[in-house]
Amino acid sequence: MQTALIALAAYLLGSISFAVVVSRLMGLPDPRTYGSHNPGATNVLRSGNKTAAILTLLGDAAKGFVAVMLAKYFAPQFGLGEPVIAAVALAALVGHMLPVFHAFKGGKGVATAIGILFAVQTGLAVSVMIIWLLVFYFSRYVSLASLCGAIVAPLLGVNYFGFGWMSLSLLIMGLLIIYRHRENIGKLMRGEESRFGSAKRDKS
């Protein structure tokens, strides 16, 4: 029961869409109405407001980080361990993807996942970020870098946590992110995906 309540709290925190909130506060169009219709930092950047995009990125990452850090701090006080932290990590990501506060129309979860990884294991997060940056630098595809990160994170997770609840949570998170990028995968295979910085930015 305690695990379910804590996971629910993490889901609700994850359901705060900073792309929508920041856009409203800054008088920008709802990111779900233009571009890729994805409420994420990359799409907010299409508004031409870099500050809004950065705030969206930081906010989405922060909510994942805060959710897991709170779980890591309070779980031991209730006699709870890795299973509840793994559940919180997954719940926060699901909240971002299916936010109850925004008609269940959420983002693809990359920024939130990075925040979660930094709270779960800093070394793991840094490794995934390096891979993301390398793929992005050489390809200029945000979506391809995100997909590579989603694939590598669960594999590296086994090295840090072994085969357990956290590794399972990371695997499910990776699969969810890959699924949310299914349209991008099709475009990459057809050579239709736009590179970051091109006239038509990558819809990631």
Image (tube, helix red, strand yellow):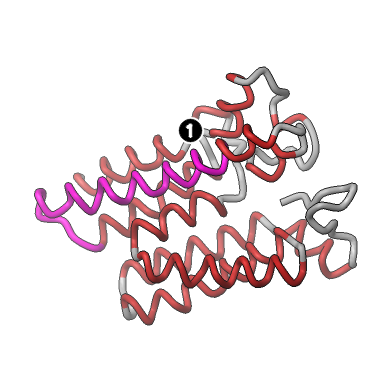
Q: Is residue 160 above or below residue 49?
A: below
Q: Would you say residue 73 sits in the magenta stretch?
A: yes
The residue that disc 1 covers is 16
Q: Quadrant of residue 158?
A: bottom left
Q: Residue at x 41, y 60 (%)?
A: 117
Magenta span dominant secondary structure: helix
Residue 28 appears left or right of 62: right
Amino acid of disc 1: Ile
Residue 24 appears left or right of 166: right
Spot occupied by residue 110 in the image (x, y as percentages of width and height): 57, 54
Q: Is residue 29 above or below residue 134?
A: above
Spot occupied by residue 120 in the image (x, y as percentages of width and height): 34, 61
> How many numbered tags mark residues here?
1
Q: Residue at x 39, y 59 (%)?
A: 118
Q: Quadrant of residue 10?
A: top left
Q: Would you say residue 194 sits in the magenta stretch?
A: no
Spot occupied by residue 51 in the image (x, y as percentages of width and height): 63, 34
The residues colored magenta run: 56-82
Residue 193 appears left or right of 80: right
Spot occupied by residue 70 in the image (x, y as percentages of width and height): 26, 45
Out of 42 and 182, give the one closest to the viewer. 42
Q: Residue at x 48, y 56 (%)?
A: 114
Q: Is residue 98 above or below residue 171?
A: above
Mark 1 surroundings: few (<14), some (14-19) or many (≥20) residues within 10 A: many
